[in-house]
Image: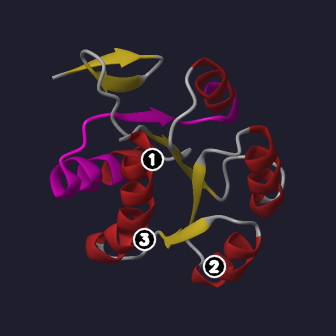
Amino acid sequence: MGVVIGGLAYTKGEEKMTRILIADPTPSSRSALSIILSHKLGMYNIGEVGDTDALIRALADNPPDVLMLDWRLYGAPAPETCRLLRKAYPIIKIVLLSVNAEDRQQALDAGAAFIYKGASPDDTLAVLEPLLKGIEERLE
């Protein structure tokens, strides 16, 4: 089993596992993503935050490997927020989440991956799996 540090879990000992932080103002969205990741990928090192203040604390305390950021979490436009976060935390992989499929290109232009909130679990995993594989290879 893992141990929780700053809201994100690690395995005990020296081995470091990929950490994902879901930043979404809607509890049901956070829960659904957490369930998909846990059941489909067998991951249990998932943190959740529902507001900007909690996100800032989580990033300062223990930056994740992957940040799944809801388009509406910040007051600033999500692509600009993504650019700022990438400058401050260049190693974090960012995935922007939106209920509007038309936001995809703006997310990609900002250097983030994109998941449409209406996507199937398989489509969601198709976006995440390449990111996670790259991180796991880096951690080895």
| Residue 119 appears left or right of 35 | right
Classed neighbour count for the residue bearing mark 3: other residues with Cα under 10 Å, few (<14), some (14–19), many (≥20) = some
Question: Where does the N terminus fall, quadrant-wise?
Answer: top left
Label annotation for residue 127: 3
Closer to the N terminus: mark 2 or mark 1?
Answer: 2
Q: Secondary structure at mark 1?
A: helix
- In this rendering, would 83 be left or right of 36? right
What residue appears at the point 62 percent right and 35 percent down from the top-left corner?
Answer: 51
Residue at horizontal 39%, vertical 76%? 119
Q: Quadrant of the C terminus?
A: top left
Q: Is residue 72 left or right of residue 14?
A: right
Q: Amino acid at mark 3?
A: Val
Disc number lying in front (2 or 1): 1
Residues rendered magenta in the picture = 33-54
Q: Reply above or below: 115 against 95.
A: below
Label 3 – label 1 distance at C-alpha: 18 Å
Q: Give the numbered dot on residue 138.
A: 1
Q: Residue 68, position in %: x, y? A: 52, 51
The local crowd at label 1, few if under 14, some if 14 to 19, many if 20 or more residues have their Cα within 10 Å, is few
Question: What's the amino acid at mark 2?
Answer: Arg
- Residue at 64% from the left image edge and 64% from the top image edge: 112
Query: Which of the 4 image quadrants contains residue 131?
Result: bottom left
